[in-house]
Image (cartoon, coloured by chain):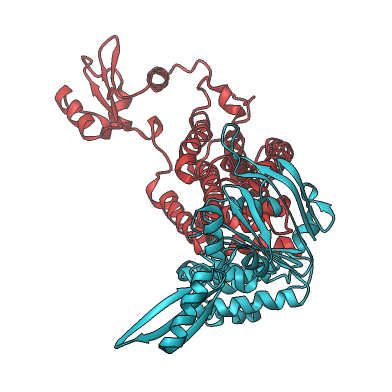
Protein backbone atom coordinates (compact mmCIF):
# COMPACT_ATOMS: atom_id res chain seq x y z
CA UNK A 1 0.00 0.00 0.00
CA UNK A 2 2.79 2.43 0.94
CA UNK A 3 6.33 2.02 -0.42
CA UNK A 4 9.04 4.41 0.72
CA UNK A 5 12.53 4.10 -0.71
CA UNK A 6 15.67 6.05 0.20
CA UNK A 7 13.71 9.04 1.46
CA UNK A 8 15.76 12.04 2.57
CA UNK A 9 14.66 15.55 3.43
CA UNK A 10 16.23 18.77 4.65
CA UNK A 11 14.40 21.99 5.47
CA UNK A 12 16.94 24.48 4.18
CA UNK A 13 19.92 24.27 1.91
CA UNK A 14 22.63 24.34 4.57
CA UNK A 15 20.90 22.42 7.34
CA UNK A 16 21.44 18.76 8.20
CA UNK A 17 19.03 16.18 6.83
CA UNK A 18 15.92 15.85 9.00
CA UNK A 19 15.23 12.51 7.38
CA UNK A 20 18.14 10.40 6.10
CA UNK A 21 17.78 7.69 3.50
CA UNK A 22 14.90 5.80 5.05
CA UNK A 23 12.98 2.94 3.42
CA UNK A 24 9.96 0.98 4.58
CA UNK A 25 6.81 -0.63 3.29
CA UNK A 26 3.29 -0.86 4.73
CA UNK A 27 0.79 -3.48 3.64
CA UNK A 28 -2.91 -2.86 3.30
CA UNK A 29 -4.77 -3.42 6.57
CA UNK A 30 -1.65 -2.89 8.64
CA UNK A 31 -1.01 -0.46 11.47
CA UNK A 32 2.52 0.78 11.05
CA UNK A 33 4.02 2.68 13.97
CA UNK A 34 6.71 5.27 13.58
CA UNK A 35 8.29 5.42 16.99
CA UNK A 36 10.77 8.04 18.04
CA UNK A 37 11.40 10.99 20.34
CA UNK A 38 10.40 14.56 19.49
CA UNK A 39 12.42 15.97 16.61
CA UNK A 40 13.37 12.53 15.30
CA UNK A 41 11.75 13.20 11.92
CA UNK A 42 8.42 11.37 12.37
CA UNK A 43 6.16 14.31 11.47
CA UNK A 44 8.39 15.24 8.52
CA UNK A 45 7.88 11.76 7.07
CA UNK A 46 4.12 12.02 7.57
CA UNK A 47 4.07 15.42 5.86
CA UNK A 48 5.92 13.99 2.87
CA UNK A 49 3.59 11.00 2.68
CA UNK A 50 0.52 13.25 2.76
CA UNK A 51 1.91 15.63 0.14
CA UNK A 52 2.29 18.54 2.56
CA UNK A 53 6.04 18.60 2.04
CA UNK A 54 7.63 18.30 -1.35
CA UNK A 55 9.53 15.11 -1.98
CA UNK A 56 13.22 15.98 -2.33
CA UNK A 57 15.07 12.67 -2.51
CA UNK A 58 13.93 9.08 -2.84
CA UNK A 59 10.57 7.74 -3.86
CA UNK A 60 7.19 7.41 -2.17
CA UNK A 61 4.50 5.30 -3.76
CA UNK A 62 1.04 5.05 -2.30
CA UNK A 63 -1.28 2.48 -3.82
CA UNK A 64 1.17 2.20 -6.71
CA UNK A 65 1.15 5.91 -7.52
CA UNK A 66 3.92 8.38 -6.98
CA UNK A 67 3.12 10.83 -4.18
CA UNK A 68 4.46 13.72 -6.28
CA UNK A 69 1.52 13.29 -8.62
CA UNK A 70 -1.01 13.16 -5.76
CA UNK A 71 -4.21 14.84 -6.79
CA UNK A 72 -7.85 14.95 -5.79
CA UNK A 73 -8.24 11.15 -5.93
CA UNK A 74 -5.39 10.69 -3.47
CA UNK A 75 -6.85 13.18 -0.99
CA UNK A 76 -10.29 11.55 -1.34
CA UNK A 77 -8.98 8.35 0.22
CA UNK A 78 -6.72 9.61 2.99
CA UNK A 79 -7.45 10.98 6.45
CA UNK A 80 -4.88 12.99 8.37
CA UNK A 81 -4.73 13.78 12.05
CA UNK A 82 -2.18 16.40 13.07
CA UNK A 83 -0.14 16.60 16.23
CA UNK A 84 -1.03 20.25 16.89
CA UNK A 85 -4.63 21.40 17.03
CA UNK A 86 -5.68 22.88 13.68
CA UNK A 87 -9.37 23.47 13.68
CA UNK A 88 -11.63 26.41 12.90
CA UNK A 89 -12.00 27.82 16.38
CA UNK A 90 -14.98 30.03 15.53
CA UNK A 91 -16.94 27.03 14.27
CA UNK A 92 -18.62 24.49 16.51
CA UNK A 93 -17.33 20.93 16.68
CA UNK A 94 -20.24 19.83 14.52
CA UNK A 95 -19.63 22.57 11.92
CA UNK A 96 -15.93 21.68 11.77
CA UNK A 97 -16.86 18.14 10.80
CA UNK A 98 -19.86 18.97 8.63
CA UNK A 99 -18.03 21.52 6.48
CA UNK A 100 -14.95 19.30 6.23
CA UNK A 101 -17.07 16.32 5.20
CA UNK A 102 -18.51 18.48 2.43
CA UNK A 103 -15.06 18.66 0.80
CA UNK A 104 -15.25 14.98 -0.20
CA UNK A 105 -16.92 13.53 -3.25
CA UNK A 106 -17.17 10.10 -1.62
CA UNK A 107 -19.66 9.15 1.07
CA UNK A 108 -18.79 10.38 4.54
CA UNK A 109 -19.92 9.48 8.03
CA UNK A 110 -22.62 11.47 9.80
CA UNK A 111 -20.75 14.11 11.86
CA UNK A 112 -22.92 13.44 14.93
CA UNK A 113 -22.11 9.73 14.72
CA UNK A 114 -18.38 10.40 14.60
CA UNK A 115 -18.64 12.92 17.43
CA UNK A 116 -20.35 10.26 19.49
CA UNK A 117 -17.53 7.80 18.77
CA UNK A 118 -14.99 10.24 20.19
CA UNK A 119 -17.20 11.30 23.11
CA UNK A 120 -17.87 14.82 21.81
CA UNK A 121 -21.54 14.59 20.98
CA UNK A 122 -22.54 16.64 24.00
CA UNK A 123 -20.11 19.37 22.94
CA UNK A 124 -21.18 19.30 19.27
CA UNK A 125 -22.74 22.76 19.42
CA UNK A 126 -19.92 24.36 21.38
CA UNK A 127 -17.34 26.53 19.61
CA UNK A 128 -14.20 24.49 18.98
CA UNK A 129 -12.08 27.36 20.32
CA UNK A 130 -13.63 26.73 23.73
CA UNK A 131 -12.69 23.04 23.71
CA UNK A 132 -9.99 21.72 26.04
CA UNK A 133 -6.75 20.42 24.53
CA UNK A 134 -7.95 16.84 24.74
CA UNK A 135 -11.29 17.71 23.12
CA UNK A 136 -9.51 19.46 20.25
CA UNK A 137 -7.33 16.38 19.81
CA UNK A 138 -10.43 14.20 19.58
CA UNK A 139 -12.06 16.59 17.11
CA UNK A 140 -8.98 16.41 14.86
CA UNK A 141 -9.12 12.64 15.07
CA UNK A 142 -12.83 12.72 14.22
CA UNK A 143 -12.14 14.94 11.22
CA UNK A 144 -9.43 12.53 10.02
CA UNK A 145 -11.88 9.63 9.90
CA UNK A 146 -14.99 11.50 8.71
CA UNK A 147 -14.47 10.35 5.09
CA UNK A 148 -13.87 6.70 6.09
CA UNK A 149 -10.37 6.88 4.53
CA UNK A 150 -8.50 3.97 3.02
CA UNK A 151 -5.26 5.26 4.52
CA UNK A 152 -5.19 6.98 7.86
CA UNK A 153 -2.22 9.11 8.90
CA UNK A 154 -2.24 9.74 12.64
CA UNK A 155 0.33 11.99 14.29
CA UNK A 156 0.34 11.49 18.07
CA UNK A 157 -3.42 10.84 18.07
CA UNK A 158 -3.67 9.93 21.74
CA UNK A 159 -1.43 12.54 23.29
CA UNK A 160 -3.10 14.47 26.08
CA UNK A 161 -6.07 12.12 26.32
CA UNK A 162 -7.29 10.47 29.51
CA UNK A 163 -7.01 6.64 29.58
CA UNK A 164 -10.75 6.05 29.03
CA UNK A 165 -10.94 8.30 25.97
CA UNK A 166 -7.64 6.97 24.65
CA UNK A 167 -9.05 3.48 24.93
CA UNK A 168 -12.07 4.51 22.81
CA UNK A 169 -9.85 5.95 20.10
CA UNK A 170 -7.66 2.84 20.12
CA UNK A 171 -10.78 0.77 19.59
CA UNK A 172 -11.72 2.93 16.57
CA UNK A 173 -8.21 2.51 15.13
CA UNK A 174 -8.34 -1.26 15.60
CA UNK A 175 -11.80 -1.31 14.03
CA UNK A 176 -10.46 0.57 11.00
CA UNK A 177 -7.71 -2.04 10.62
CA UNK A 178 -10.22 -4.84 10.83
CA UNK A 179 -12.04 -3.22 7.89
CA UNK A 180 -8.86 -3.36 5.80
CA UNK A 181 -7.74 0.24 6.27
CA UNK A 182 -4.06 1.06 6.37
CA UNK A 183 -2.82 3.17 9.26
CA UNK A 184 0.41 5.10 9.56
CA UNK A 185 0.84 6.09 13.18
CA UNK A 186 3.58 8.33 14.49
CA UNK A 187 4.03 8.42 18.23
CA UNK A 188 6.53 8.63 21.01
CA UNK A 189 4.23 6.59 23.24
CA UNK A 190 5.60 3.04 23.46
CA UNK A 191 2.44 1.64 25.02
CA UNK A 192 0.29 2.94 22.15
CA UNK A 193 2.70 1.47 19.61
CA UNK A 194 2.94 -1.82 21.45
CA UNK A 195 -0.81 -2.17 21.78
CA UNK A 196 -1.83 -1.09 18.30
CA UNK A 197 0.92 -1.65 15.78
CA UNK A 198 1.54 -4.67 13.62
CA UNK A 199 4.97 -3.32 12.77
CA UNK A 200 7.04 -0.49 14.16
CA UNK A 201 10.04 1.43 12.97
CA UNK A 202 12.32 3.12 15.45
CA UNK A 203 13.42 6.48 14.12
CA UNK A 204 16.18 8.51 15.68
CA UNK A 205 17.84 11.66 14.31
CA UNK A 206 16.14 11.09 10.96
CA UNK A 207 17.24 7.47 10.50
CA UNK A 208 15.41 4.20 10.92
CA UNK A 209 17.47 2.21 13.37
CA UNK A 210 15.29 -0.84 13.67
CA UNK A 211 12.06 -2.11 12.15
CA UNK A 212 9.97 -5.19 12.93
CA UNK A 213 6.86 -6.29 14.79
CA UNK A 214 6.82 -5.33 18.49
CA UNK A 215 6.92 -9.02 19.40
CA UNK A 216 9.98 -9.74 17.28
CA UNK A 217 11.74 -6.65 18.59
CA UNK A 218 11.16 -7.82 22.13
CA UNK A 219 12.41 -11.27 21.30
CA UNK A 220 15.45 -9.88 19.59
CA UNK A 221 16.45 -7.23 22.10
CA UNK A 222 14.54 -7.97 25.32
CA UNK A 223 15.57 -10.06 28.33
CA UNK A 224 13.08 -12.27 30.16
CA UNK A 225 13.00 -11.56 33.85
CA UNK A 226 11.26 -12.75 37.01
CA UNK A 227 10.32 -10.38 39.79
CA UNK A 228 9.95 -12.22 43.08
CA UNK A 229 8.64 -10.98 46.43
CA UNK A 230 9.51 -13.13 49.49
CA UNK A 231 9.99 -13.09 53.27
CA UNK A 232 13.52 -13.29 54.67
CA UNK A 233 13.07 -13.77 58.40
CA UNK A 234 10.83 -10.92 59.43
CA UNK A 235 11.65 -8.77 56.39
CA UNK A 236 9.86 -8.69 53.01
CA UNK A 237 12.27 -8.51 50.07
CA UNK A 238 11.96 -8.06 46.28
CA UNK A 239 14.51 -9.22 43.67
CA UNK A 240 14.61 -9.39 39.86
CA UNK A 241 16.33 -12.31 38.16
CA UNK A 242 17.29 -12.76 34.51
CA UNK A 243 17.07 -16.53 34.00
CA UNK A 244 19.34 -16.46 30.94
CA UNK A 245 22.15 -15.81 33.45
CA UNK A 246 23.30 -18.98 35.30
CA UNK A 247 24.12 -17.12 38.56
CA UNK A 248 20.61 -15.55 38.60
CA UNK A 249 19.07 -19.00 37.96
CA UNK A 250 21.00 -20.50 40.93
CA UNK A 251 20.14 -17.62 43.25
CA UNK A 252 16.45 -17.81 42.27
CA UNK A 253 16.41 -21.57 43.09
CA UNK A 254 17.93 -20.95 46.55
CA UNK A 255 15.35 -18.30 47.42
CA UNK A 256 12.46 -20.48 46.32
CA UNK A 257 13.84 -23.41 48.41
CA UNK A 258 14.57 -21.45 51.61
CA UNK A 259 12.00 -18.64 51.79
CA UNK A 260 8.28 -18.09 51.76
CA UNK A 261 7.27 -16.67 48.38
CA UNK A 262 4.65 -13.96 48.39
CA UNK A 263 4.39 -13.03 44.63
CA UNK A 264 6.11 -13.95 41.35
CA UNK A 265 5.83 -11.82 38.16
CA UNK A 266 7.35 -12.60 34.81
CA UNK A 267 8.55 -9.55 32.86
CA UNK A 268 9.56 -8.70 29.32
CA UNK A 269 11.31 -5.63 27.97
CA UNK A 270 9.15 -2.73 26.86
CA UNK A 271 9.61 -1.01 23.50
CA UNK A 272 10.94 2.02 25.34
CA UNK A 273 13.58 -0.11 27.07
CA UNK A 274 14.53 -1.55 23.70
CA UNK A 275 14.68 1.91 22.15
CA UNK A 276 16.94 3.09 24.97
CA UNK A 277 19.06 0.01 24.59
CA UNK A 278 19.56 0.66 20.86
CA UNK A 279 19.89 4.45 20.86
CA UNK A 280 20.84 5.39 24.40
CA UNK A 281 17.99 7.94 24.18
CA UNK A 282 14.60 8.05 25.89
CA UNK A 283 11.41 8.31 23.83
CA UNK A 284 9.82 11.07 25.88
CA UNK B 1 -20.43 22.56 -6.28
CA UNK B 2 -20.81 20.60 -3.02
CA UNK B 3 -17.15 21.21 -2.21
CA UNK B 4 -17.39 24.91 -3.01
CA UNK B 5 -20.50 25.28 -0.83
CA UNK B 6 -18.72 23.65 2.10
CA UNK B 7 -15.71 25.94 1.80
CA UNK B 8 -18.02 28.90 1.36
CA UNK B 9 -20.08 27.97 4.43
CA UNK B 10 -16.87 27.68 6.45
CA UNK B 11 -15.67 31.12 5.35
CA UNK B 12 -19.09 32.70 5.63
CA UNK B 13 -19.68 31.38 9.16
CA UNK B 14 -16.20 32.43 10.29
CA UNK B 15 -16.74 35.92 8.80
CA UNK B 16 -20.15 36.14 10.49
CA UNK B 17 -18.70 35.10 13.86
CA UNK B 18 -15.86 37.58 13.37
CA UNK B 19 -18.64 40.21 13.27
CA UNK B 20 -17.61 41.39 9.80
CA UNK B 21 -21.22 41.82 8.71
CA UNK B 22 -22.19 43.69 11.87
CA UNK B 23 -19.16 45.98 11.49
CA UNK B 24 -20.07 46.96 7.92
CA UNK B 25 -23.75 47.47 8.75
CA UNK B 26 -22.82 49.79 11.63
CA UNK B 27 -20.38 51.65 9.36
CA UNK B 28 -22.99 52.02 6.62
CA UNK B 29 -25.54 53.47 9.03
CA UNK B 30 -22.94 55.73 10.63
CA UNK B 31 -21.73 57.01 7.28
CA UNK B 32 -25.24 57.75 6.07
CA UNK B 33 -25.88 59.75 9.25
CA UNK B 34 -22.66 61.68 8.63
CA UNK B 35 -23.72 62.36 5.04
CA UNK B 36 -27.18 63.50 6.08
CA UNK B 37 -26.42 65.49 9.19
CA UNK B 38 -22.75 66.36 9.53
CA UNK B 39 -21.42 67.21 6.10
CA UNK B 40 -22.96 70.40 4.69
CA UNK B 41 -24.17 70.56 1.13
CA UNK B 42 -21.86 73.46 0.39
CA UNK B 43 -18.71 74.99 1.77
CA UNK B 44 -16.24 77.44 0.27
CA UNK B 45 -16.50 80.77 -1.48
CA UNK B 46 -19.95 80.28 -2.95
CA UNK B 47 -21.53 80.46 0.48
CA UNK B 48 -19.16 83.01 2.00
CA UNK B 49 -20.75 86.25 3.15
CA UNK B 50 -19.29 89.48 1.83
CA UNK B 51 -19.05 92.58 4.04
CA UNK B 52 -18.67 95.95 2.37
CA UNK B 53 -17.28 99.25 3.62
CA UNK B 54 -17.95 102.19 1.37
CA UNK B 55 -15.12 104.63 2.00
CA UNK B 56 -15.72 106.66 -1.17
CA UNK B 57 -16.47 110.33 -0.74
CA UNK B 58 -20.14 110.32 -1.54
CA UNK B 59 -20.94 106.66 -1.93
CA UNK B 60 -20.05 105.90 -5.53
CA UNK B 61 -22.33 102.96 -5.80
CA UNK B 62 -25.78 104.09 -4.77
CA UNK B 63 -27.20 100.61 -5.50
CA UNK B 64 -25.20 99.15 -2.64
CA UNK B 65 -27.24 100.96 -0.03
CA UNK B 66 -30.46 99.84 -1.63
CA UNK B 67 -29.74 96.19 -2.42
CA UNK B 68 -26.90 95.17 -0.07
CA UNK B 69 -27.56 97.21 3.06
CA UNK B 70 -27.31 94.20 5.37
CA UNK B 71 -23.69 93.67 4.28
CA UNK B 72 -22.59 97.26 4.67
CA UNK B 73 -20.37 98.14 7.57
CA UNK B 74 -19.86 101.45 9.37
CA UNK B 75 -16.08 101.59 9.46
CA UNK B 76 -12.97 99.47 9.07
CA UNK B 77 -13.08 98.33 12.68
CA UNK B 78 -16.69 97.20 12.29
CA UNK B 79 -15.75 95.36 9.04
CA UNK B 80 -12.86 93.48 10.64
CA UNK B 81 -14.97 92.63 13.65
CA UNK B 82 -17.56 91.03 11.39
CA UNK B 83 -14.87 89.18 9.47
CA UNK B 84 -13.39 87.86 12.70
CA UNK B 85 -16.79 86.61 13.74
CA UNK B 86 -17.35 84.73 10.48
CA UNK B 87 -14.27 82.88 9.34
CA UNK B 88 -15.65 82.10 5.89
CA UNK B 89 -16.51 85.73 5.10
CA UNK B 90 -14.38 88.26 3.27
CA UNK B 91 -14.63 92.02 2.92
CA UNK B 92 -14.39 94.80 0.38
CA UNK B 93 -13.43 98.39 1.12
CA UNK B 94 -14.44 100.78 -1.65
CA UNK B 95 -12.40 103.90 -2.27
CA UNK B 96 -12.98 106.63 -4.84
CA UNK B 97 -10.90 105.11 -7.58
CA UNK B 98 -10.30 101.56 -6.42
CA UNK B 99 -11.33 98.89 -3.96
CA UNK B 100 -9.50 96.57 -1.58
CA UNK B 101 -10.47 93.00 -0.86
CA UNK B 102 -9.77 91.65 2.63
CA UNK B 103 -9.25 87.91 2.83
CA UNK B 104 -9.14 85.71 5.91
CA UNK B 105 -5.71 84.51 4.89
CA UNK B 106 -6.38 80.80 4.40
CA UNK B 107 -7.85 81.10 0.89
CA UNK B 108 -6.01 79.42 -1.94
CA UNK B 109 -4.67 81.40 -4.89
CA UNK B 110 -7.41 79.86 -6.99
CA UNK B 111 -10.10 81.02 -4.56
CA UNK B 112 -8.55 84.48 -4.37
CA UNK B 113 -8.51 84.77 -8.16
CA UNK B 114 -12.14 83.69 -8.38
CA UNK B 115 -13.14 86.25 -5.73
CA UNK B 116 -11.13 89.02 -7.46
CA UNK B 117 -12.73 88.20 -10.82
CA UNK B 118 -16.19 88.03 -9.24
CA UNK B 119 -15.65 91.37 -7.53
CA UNK B 120 -14.64 92.99 -10.82
CA UNK B 121 -17.73 91.65 -12.56
CA UNK B 122 -19.85 92.74 -9.60
CA UNK B 123 -18.59 96.32 -9.66
CA UNK B 124 -18.82 96.45 -13.46
CA UNK B 125 -22.45 95.43 -13.22
CA UNK B 126 -23.07 98.13 -10.64
CA UNK B 127 -21.61 100.57 -13.10
CA UNK B 128 -23.88 99.17 -15.77
CA UNK B 129 -21.06 97.56 -17.76
CA UNK B 130 -22.04 94.22 -19.27
CA UNK B 131 -19.27 93.24 -21.71
CA UNK B 132 -20.59 89.74 -22.35
CA UNK B 133 -24.13 89.55 -21.04
CA UNK B 134 -24.80 86.06 -22.41
CA UNK B 135 -21.87 83.82 -21.49
CA UNK B 136 -22.08 80.18 -22.59
CA UNK B 137 -20.07 77.26 -21.25
CA UNK B 138 -19.19 73.71 -22.34
CA UNK B 139 -17.48 70.76 -20.63
CA UNK B 140 -14.93 68.77 -22.58
CA UNK B 141 -13.79 66.50 -19.73
CA UNK B 142 -15.54 63.75 -17.81
CA UNK B 143 -17.01 66.26 -15.39
CA UNK B 144 -20.32 67.86 -16.19
CA UNK B 145 -22.14 68.79 -13.05
CA UNK B 146 -21.11 69.04 -9.45
CA UNK B 147 -22.75 67.06 -6.65
CA UNK B 148 -23.56 68.75 -3.35
CA UNK B 149 -20.63 68.24 -0.97
CA UNK B 150 -22.34 65.68 1.24
CA UNK B 151 -23.32 63.61 -1.81
CA UNK B 152 -19.85 64.06 -3.26
CA UNK B 153 -18.50 62.28 -0.18
CA UNK B 154 -20.52 59.12 -0.96
CA UNK B 155 -18.26 57.84 -3.79
CA UNK B 156 -15.21 58.45 -1.60
CA UNK B 157 -16.68 56.63 1.38
CA UNK B 158 -17.87 53.75 -0.78
CA UNK B 159 -14.66 53.25 -2.70
CA UNK B 160 -12.24 53.72 0.20
CA UNK B 161 -14.25 51.52 2.51
CA UNK B 162 -14.70 48.77 -0.03
CA UNK B 163 -10.98 48.89 -0.71
CA UNK B 164 -9.81 49.08 2.90
CA UNK B 165 -12.35 46.65 4.35
CA UNK B 166 -12.06 44.17 1.50
CA UNK B 167 -8.30 44.16 1.65
CA UNK B 168 -8.14 43.81 5.42
CA UNK B 169 -11.00 41.35 5.87
CA UNK B 170 -9.63 38.90 3.34
CA UNK B 171 -6.19 39.16 4.90
CA UNK B 172 -7.68 38.53 8.35
CA UNK B 173 -9.47 35.45 6.99
CA UNK B 174 -6.24 34.07 5.55
CA UNK B 175 -4.13 34.81 8.63
CA UNK B 176 -6.75 33.41 10.97
CA UNK B 177 -6.72 30.20 8.96
CA UNK B 178 -2.92 30.11 9.05
CA UNK B 179 -2.79 30.82 12.77
CA UNK B 180 -5.46 28.29 13.72
CA UNK B 181 -3.96 25.77 11.31
CA UNK B 182 -7.16 25.15 9.33
CA UNK B 183 -5.17 25.65 6.14
CA UNK B 184 -3.16 22.46 6.86
CA UNK B 185 -6.33 20.39 7.12
CA UNK B 186 -7.60 22.02 3.93
CA UNK B 187 -4.41 21.10 2.10
CA UNK B 188 -4.91 17.40 2.73
CA UNK B 189 -8.52 17.53 1.60
CA UNK B 190 -9.61 16.96 -2.01
CA UNK B 191 -10.93 20.52 -2.33
CA UNK B 192 -8.55 22.56 -4.42
CA UNK B 193 -7.18 26.08 -4.80
CA UNK B 194 -10.04 27.33 -6.95
CA UNK B 195 -12.63 26.67 -4.24
CA UNK B 196 -10.34 28.20 -1.64
CA UNK B 197 -9.93 31.48 -3.53
CA UNK B 198 -13.46 31.72 -4.91
CA UNK B 199 -15.11 31.14 -1.57
CA UNK B 200 -13.14 33.86 0.19
CA UNK B 201 -13.76 36.29 -2.65
CA UNK B 202 -17.49 35.59 -2.61
CA UNK B 203 -17.72 36.17 1.14
CA UNK B 204 -15.81 39.41 0.74
CA UNK B 205 -18.04 40.56 -2.12
CA UNK B 206 -21.08 39.83 0.06
CA UNK B 207 -19.66 41.90 2.92
CA UNK B 208 -18.88 44.80 0.57
CA UNK B 209 -22.29 44.51 -1.04
CA UNK B 210 -24.09 44.63 2.29
CA UNK B 211 -22.09 47.74 3.21
CA UNK B 212 -22.48 49.45 -0.15
CA UNK B 213 -26.18 48.84 -0.67
CA UNK B 214 -27.20 49.80 2.87
CA UNK B 215 -25.09 52.95 2.73
CA UNK B 216 -26.38 53.99 -0.69
CA UNK B 217 -29.99 53.25 0.19
CA UNK B 218 -29.83 55.19 3.45
CA UNK B 219 -28.01 58.09 1.79
CA UNK B 220 -29.71 58.30 -1.61
CA UNK B 221 -32.89 56.23 -1.39
CA UNK B 222 -34.27 55.14 -4.74
CA UNK B 223 -32.77 57.99 -6.74
CA UNK B 224 -29.83 55.98 -8.14
CA UNK B 225 -29.38 53.09 -10.54
CA UNK B 226 -28.83 50.11 -8.23
CA UNK B 227 -27.84 47.83 -11.09
CA UNK B 228 -24.79 49.93 -11.93
CA UNK B 229 -23.95 50.39 -8.27
CA UNK B 230 -24.20 46.64 -7.64
CA UNK B 231 -21.95 45.91 -10.60
CA UNK B 232 -19.43 48.48 -9.43
CA UNK B 233 -19.33 47.10 -5.88
CA UNK B 234 -19.10 43.47 -7.06
CA UNK B 235 -16.32 44.09 -9.58
CA UNK B 236 -14.44 46.46 -7.27
CA UNK B 237 -14.51 44.15 -4.25
CA UNK B 238 -13.68 41.16 -6.47
CA UNK B 239 -10.51 42.85 -7.67
CA UNK B 240 -9.45 44.16 -4.26
CA UNK B 241 -10.02 40.70 -2.73
CA UNK B 242 -7.69 39.25 -5.35
CA UNK B 243 -5.04 41.83 -4.44
CA UNK B 244 -5.57 40.95 -0.77
CA UNK B 245 -5.19 37.19 -1.25
CA UNK B 246 -2.26 37.59 -3.58
CA UNK B 247 -0.28 39.69 -1.12
CA UNK B 248 -1.39 38.05 2.15
CA UNK B 249 -0.27 34.56 1.09
CA UNK B 250 3.39 35.57 1.34
CA UNK B 251 3.16 36.58 5.01
CA UNK B 252 2.61 34.41 8.05
CA UNK B 253 0.88 36.90 10.35
CA UNK B 254 -1.17 40.06 10.29
CA UNK B 255 1.64 41.87 12.14
CA UNK B 256 4.02 41.22 9.27
CA UNK B 257 1.39 42.11 6.72
CA UNK B 258 0.21 45.38 8.26
CA UNK B 259 2.92 47.51 6.62
CA UNK B 260 1.99 46.18 3.18
CA UNK B 261 -1.67 46.80 3.95
CA UNK B 262 -0.96 50.39 4.97
CA UNK B 263 1.07 51.13 1.83
CA UNK B 264 -1.59 49.55 -0.38
CA UNK B 265 -4.40 51.48 1.26
CA UNK B 266 -2.49 54.77 1.15
CA UNK B 267 -1.92 54.36 -2.57
CA UNK B 268 -5.58 53.54 -3.09
CA UNK B 269 -6.67 56.63 -1.15
CA UNK B 270 -4.42 59.03 -3.10
CA UNK B 271 -6.93 59.59 -5.94
CA UNK B 272 -9.29 61.27 -3.45
CA UNK B 273 -7.18 64.41 -3.96
CA UNK B 274 -7.75 64.32 -7.70
CA UNK B 275 -11.41 63.48 -7.30
CA UNK B 276 -11.97 66.53 -5.12
CA UNK B 277 -9.84 68.86 -7.18
CA UNK B 278 -9.63 67.79 -10.84
CA UNK B 279 -7.61 70.93 -11.61
CA UNK B 280 -4.61 69.51 -9.77
CA UNK B 281 -1.90 68.24 -12.05
CA UNK B 282 -2.01 64.69 -10.69
CA UNK B 283 -3.10 62.76 -13.75
CA UNK B 284 -0.90 59.84 -12.69
CA UNK B 285 -3.50 59.13 -9.99
CA UNK B 286 -6.01 58.31 -12.71
CA UNK B 287 -4.32 54.98 -13.29
CA UNK B 288 -4.97 53.93 -9.69
CA UNK B 289 -8.05 51.75 -9.80
CA UNK B 290 -9.78 53.47 -6.88
CA UNK B 291 -10.02 56.68 -8.95
CA UNK B 292 -12.20 55.16 -11.63
CA UNK B 293 -14.33 53.42 -8.96
CA UNK B 294 -14.80 56.75 -7.20
CA UNK B 295 -15.59 58.70 -10.35
CA UNK B 296 -17.96 56.01 -11.63
CA UNK B 297 -19.86 56.08 -8.33
CA UNK B 298 -20.06 59.85 -8.73
CA UNK B 299 -21.52 59.48 -12.24
CA UNK B 300 -23.95 56.78 -11.13
CA UNK B 301 -25.26 59.12 -8.42
CA UNK B 302 -25.60 61.93 -10.96
CA UNK B 303 -27.07 59.56 -13.54
CA UNK B 304 -24.72 60.65 -16.29
CA UNK B 305 -21.65 59.66 -18.33
CA UNK B 306 -22.67 56.03 -18.87
CA UNK B 307 -19.74 55.53 -21.24
CA UNK B 308 -17.25 56.24 -18.42
CA UNK B 309 -19.11 53.86 -16.08
CA UNK B 310 -19.02 51.08 -18.68
CA UNK B 311 -15.37 51.82 -19.37
CA UNK B 312 -14.71 51.33 -15.65
CA UNK B 313 -16.56 47.99 -15.63
CA UNK B 314 -14.45 46.84 -18.58
CA UNK B 315 -11.30 48.09 -16.89
CA UNK B 316 -12.11 46.24 -13.66
CA UNK B 317 -12.97 43.08 -15.60
CA UNK B 318 -9.64 43.19 -17.43
CA UNK B 319 -7.81 43.62 -14.12
CA UNK B 320 -9.73 40.67 -12.65
CA UNK B 321 -8.95 38.55 -15.72
CA UNK B 322 -5.26 39.32 -15.16
CA UNK B 323 -5.18 38.96 -11.36
CA UNK B 324 -7.31 35.82 -11.00
CA UNK B 325 -4.96 33.36 -12.75
CA UNK B 326 -1.96 35.07 -11.16
CA UNK B 327 -3.48 34.68 -7.70
CA UNK B 328 -4.65 31.15 -8.44
CA UNK B 329 -1.24 29.85 -9.49
CA UNK B 330 0.69 31.65 -6.76
CA UNK B 331 -1.72 30.48 -4.03
CA UNK B 332 -1.52 26.96 -5.38
CA UNK B 333 2.26 27.08 -5.32
CA UNK B 334 2.81 29.02 -2.10
CA UNK B 335 -0.17 28.58 0.19
CA UNK B 336 -1.54 25.20 -0.77
CA UNK B 337 1.63 23.31 -1.65
CA UNK B 338 4.19 24.70 0.77
CA UNK B 339 4.25 24.14 4.49
CA UNK B 340 5.11 27.21 6.49
CA UNK B 341 6.60 25.93 9.70
Is residue B318 rendered to the left or right of residue A98?
right
- Residue farthest along the right direction in this orientation: A64
Q: Where is residue B107 in the image (x, y as percent from the top left)?
A: 34, 24
Which chain appears red? B
Locate the N terminus of chain B by quadrant: bottom right
- Residue farthest along the left direction in this orientation: B77
Above or below residue A111? Residue A279 is above
Residue B222 shows in this picture: no
Above or below residue A140? Residue B316 is above
Is residue A211 rendered to the left or right of residue A70?
left
Count the numbered circles shown.
Answer: 0
Above or below residue B227? Residue B2 is below
Q: Position of residue A117 (x, y in %)?
A: 61, 81
- Front one among A110 and B92: A110
Q: Position of residue B23 (x, y in %)?
A: 47, 57
Residue A244 shows in this picture: yes
Snapshot quadrant of residue A100 = bottom right
**Which colour represents chain A?**
cyan
- Front one among A27 and B114: A27
Amino acid sequence: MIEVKNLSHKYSGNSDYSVKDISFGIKQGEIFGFLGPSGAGKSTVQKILTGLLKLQNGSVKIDGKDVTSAGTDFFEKIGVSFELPNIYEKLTGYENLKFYAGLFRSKTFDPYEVLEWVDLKDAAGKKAGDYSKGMKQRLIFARAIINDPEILFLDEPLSGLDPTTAQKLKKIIIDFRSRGKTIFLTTHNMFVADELCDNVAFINTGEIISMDSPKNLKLKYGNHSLKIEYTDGEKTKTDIFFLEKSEDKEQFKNIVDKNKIITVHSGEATLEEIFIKITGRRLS
Amino acid sequence: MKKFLSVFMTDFTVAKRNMFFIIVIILAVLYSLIVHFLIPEKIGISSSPLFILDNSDNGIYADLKVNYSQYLTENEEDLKKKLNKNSSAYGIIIYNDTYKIIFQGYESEKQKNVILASAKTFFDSLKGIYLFPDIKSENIGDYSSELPLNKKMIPILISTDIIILCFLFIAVMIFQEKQEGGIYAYRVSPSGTLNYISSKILVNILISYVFGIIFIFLSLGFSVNYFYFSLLIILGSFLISLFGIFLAQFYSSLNEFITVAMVFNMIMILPVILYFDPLMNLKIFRIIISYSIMLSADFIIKGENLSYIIKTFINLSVWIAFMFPLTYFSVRKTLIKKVIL
